[in-house]
Image: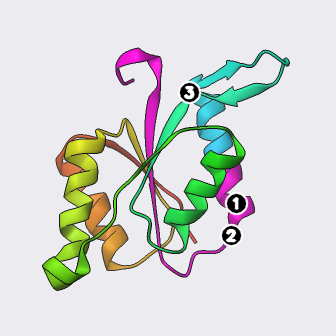
């Protein structure tokens, strides 16, 4: 868990991933299982997490939608395609690890970019939960 008691979840996945209901259910369940929830003044329970996103369409932006729906802060990292060309995605992925410092990576179905994020996360010793198609 990060300093201040708020855990950080990095959610990634394919650009064509569209299943918000499944993504929401997975993130809700992970937060409950790990005790990453807090009570709100109106008696509701909310996730006590920050969501890290690479802001690609698909799973990345759906995770931001989930964060918004659950009043969770986000850390957004954008790939600089103009400057870095094809290397922009891997550079952004490493930046999310180095600067975002996730406690958990949740990888929804995706392609090479998602596989790169999973590989980098494991190399950094970060727990990865892979969600199968």
Verify whether residue 77 appears in magenta: no
Q: Report the residue at 32% width, 73% height from top.
A: 113
Along the viewing direction, whichever of 10 and 132 lies nearer the viewer: 10
Q: Is disc 3 in contact with disc 2, using a CB cutoff of under 8 Å? A: no
Q: Residues within 10 Å of mark 2 (few under 14, many from 20)?
A: few
Q: Residues within 10 Å of mark 3 (few under 14, many from 20)?
A: few
Would you name the residue on which mark 3 appears? 34
Residue 72 in percent (x, y) is at 59, 38
User: Residue furthest toward the front?
Assistant: 82
Q: Is residue 35 left or right of residue 98?
A: right
Work out whether 20 lies above or below 45. below
Report, in whole angstroms, how far the alpha carbon at label 2 lies from the one at label 1: 5 Å
Report, in whole angstroms, how far the alpha carbon at label 3 lies from the one at label 1: 18 Å
Q: Is disc 2 in contact with disc 1, using a CB cutoff of under 8 Å? A: yes
Q: Is residue 37 left or right of residue 109?
A: right
Work out whether 53 lies above or below 90. above
Point out the tag, 3 or 2, that comes first from the N-terminus. Answer: 2
Work out whether 103 lies above or below 41. below
Q: Report the residue at 30% width, 61% height from top.
A: 117
Report, in whole angstroms, how far the alpha carbon at label 3 lies from the one at label 2: 23 Å
Q: Secondary structure at mark 3?
A: helix
Q: Secondary structure at mark 2?
A: loop
Point out the tag, 3 or 1, that comes first from the N-terminus. Answer: 1
Q: Is residue 97 left or right of residue 40?
A: left
Q: Splitting the image into 4 quarters, where does residue 18 fall?
A: bottom right
Residue 50 in percent (x, y) is at 49, 37
Q: Report the residue at 32% width, 69% height from top.
A: 115
Would you name the residue on which mark 1 appears? 22
Would you name the residue on which mark 2 appears? 19
Q: How many marks?
A: 3
The region drawn magenta spans: 1-26
Q: Report the residue at 23% width, 43% height from top.
A: 99
């Amino acid at each position: 868990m990060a300093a201040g008691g708020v855990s950080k979840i990095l959610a990634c996945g394919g650009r064509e991933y569209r299943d918000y209901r499944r993504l929401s259910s997975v993130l809700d369940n992970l937060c409950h299982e790990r005790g990453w929830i807090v009570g709100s003044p109106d008696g509701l329970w909310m996730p006590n997490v920050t969501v890290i996103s690479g802001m690609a369409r698909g799973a990345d932006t759906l995770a931001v939608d989930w964060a918004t729906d659950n009043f969770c802060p986000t850390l957004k990292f954008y790939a600089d395609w103009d400057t870095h060309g094809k290397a922009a995605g891997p550079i952004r992925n490493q930046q999310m690890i180095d600067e975002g410092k996730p406690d958990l990576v949740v990888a929804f179905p995706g392609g090479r970019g998602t596989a790169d994020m999973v590989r980098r996360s494991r190399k950094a010793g970060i727990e990865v939960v892979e969600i199968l198609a």
